[in-house]
Each structure stands twice: as structure tokens, then as C-alpha cells.
Amino acid sequence: MAVPPGVTLRLFASAREAAGTARAEFTGATVGDVLDAASGRYGQGFVAVLRTSRVWVNGAPAVRGDPVAPGDEVAVLPPVSGGAP
């Protein structure tokens, strides 16, 4: 019997660095469930990055209460800095 897919969490820039990975699978009914599970796994450095990050589900802006389903993709996009003055 195949295992149903979870929700894929994709991490970029400083979120990826804080977690030590670019992608992971979690279960949860909402965006908040997934982010809470990731925070528990990756710790305070990840939590700090999450505070200033934007979150998207399947390519659309999302908030913690938005529902997610197996196969969905939650992306954490921290603010980007840099460039020439």
C-alpha cells in the first residue's frame, strides 16, 4: 500500500540555512500546523526567520489559518537583501 503524500515545505534563503534543508514533508490541516511542526523540528533559529518571512501555498500568498492538503506545497520566503548601492 502506498503512503499518501504529506505537505511539502520548501525553504529558501535564510529559512533554508536555519533549517539545514531546502525541502521537507509534514502533515497538518492548516499552514499554521505545518509551520508549527517545522518550528519544532528546526528550532529557534528557524522561528526567528519565520517571523519576517512570507508564506505561499501552491504559488499563492497564504496565512496560518489557510487549509492545506496532502500534495500541497508550502513555501517560506524570507526577505531578500543585498545588491549594489
Image: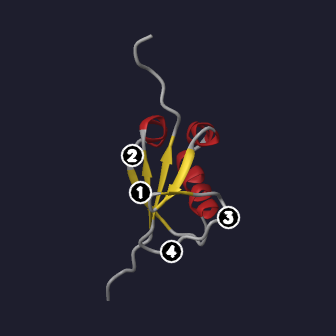
Q: Residue, x 32% and y 89% (percent of image)?
A: 1
Q: Residue, x 56% and y 61% (percent of image)?
A: 34
Tag 4 or tag 2, which sits nearer the N-term?
A: 2
Residue position marked by numbered label 1 in the rendering: 24
The quarter of the picture where the C terminus appears is: top left
Residue position marked by numbered label 3 in the rendering: 65
Tag 1 or tag 3, which sits nearer the N-term?
A: 1
* Left or right: 5, with 47 as reference point: left
Cβ–Cβ under 8 Å for marks 1 and 4? no
Cβ–Cβ under 8 Å for marks 2 and 1? yes
Q: CA distance from mark 1 to mark 4?
A: 15 Å
Q: CA distance from mark 2 to mark 1?
A: 7 Å
Of labels 3 and 2, the one closer to you: 3
Residue position marked by numbered label 4 in the rendering: 69
Pointer 1: residues within 10 angstroms few (<14), some, or many (20+)? few
Residue position marked by numbered label 2 in the rendering: 21
Mark drawn on residue 83: none
Disc 1 residue type (three-letter): Ala
**Residue 9 against residue 46 in the figure, above or below:** below
Disc 2 residue type (three-letter): Thr
State the scheme by which the image is colored.
Answer: secondary structure
